């Protein structure tokens, strides 16, 4: 039996946010413009798949606070590096997304 793919609003928004954060990192570190480098593309695909099959679905917390953390060790290290870099910069490059997330973390 095939697993159900998450496609709720929270998962979709997280997918969009993680993509923007990886794009930002790749642009600044690997001199890319409209496409990701191979390594970042692999990570982006991996992160999207994790979200598609996240066992918590729409009830998920942030991956950072997740008690399970389903990422493979090497992928987890990469995504953490990217989040550290892109997190604070999201306010400059993607203020609407950043504000939405800040608001949510205050409310929820
Ligand atoms: S780390 Fe946790 S919250 Fe994030 S996708 Fe994996 S299981 Fe879901
Ligand atoms: Zn890259």
Image (cartoon, rainbow, N blue to C red):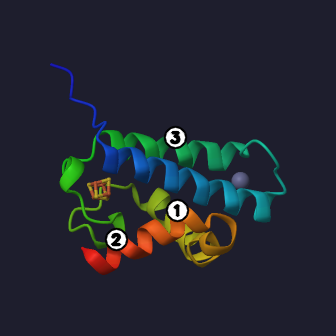
Q: Nearer the viewer, residue 54 or 90?
A: 90
Closer to the observer: label 1 or label 3? 1
- Dot 1 or dot 3: first in sequence order is 3
User: Residue at horizontal 47%, vertical 44%?
Assistant: 46
* Residue with the mark numbered 2: 104
In depth, the one of 93 and 40 nearer the eye is 93
Considering the numbered disc 3 on the image, is that residue within a helix, a strand or a loop?
helix
Does residue 10 appear left or right of residue 26 in this picture? left
Q: Secondary structure at mark 2?
A: helix
Horizontal relation, residue 43 to residue 29: left or right: left
Query: On the rendered structure, is 39 left or right of 16?
Result: right
Image position, residue 11 (x, y; %): 34, 47
Q: Position of residue 101 (x, y in %)?
A: 42, 68
- Residue furthest to the left: 1
Residue at label 3?
45
The quadrant the C terminus occupies is bottom left
Residue density around tag 3, few if under 14, some if 14–19, many if 20 or more, within 10 Å: few
Name the residue at 44% across, 62% down.
76
Which element is circle 1 on?
Answer: helix
Q: Which residue is mark 1?
A: 97
How dense is the environment of label 1, judged by Cα within 10 Å: few (below 14), some, or many (20 and up)?
Answer: some
Question: Which residue is drawn at the image coordinates 57% and 71% (left, top)?
Answer: 81
- Of 7 and 80, nearer the camera is 7
3D distance between C-alphas at marks 1 and 3 = 20 Å
Image marks 1 and 3: residues in contact by CB distance under 8 Å: no
Residue 86 in the image: state x and y as whole percent.
61, 70
Q: CA distance from mark 3 to mark 2?
A: 25 Å
């Amino acid at each position: 039996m095939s697993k159900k793919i998450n496609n709720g609003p929270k998962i979709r928004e997280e997918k969009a946010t993680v993509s923007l954060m990886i794009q930002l990192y790749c642009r600044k570190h690997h001199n890319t413009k409209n496409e990701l480098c191979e390594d970042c593309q692999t990570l982006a695909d991996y992160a999207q798949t994790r979200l598609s099959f996240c066992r918590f679905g729409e009830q998920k917390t942030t991956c950072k606070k997740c008690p399970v953390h389903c990422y493979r060790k090497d992928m987890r290290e990469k995504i953490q590096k990217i989040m550290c870099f892109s997190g604070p910069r999201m306010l400059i490059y993607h203020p609407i997304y950043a504000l939405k997330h800040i608001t949510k973390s205050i409310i929820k």
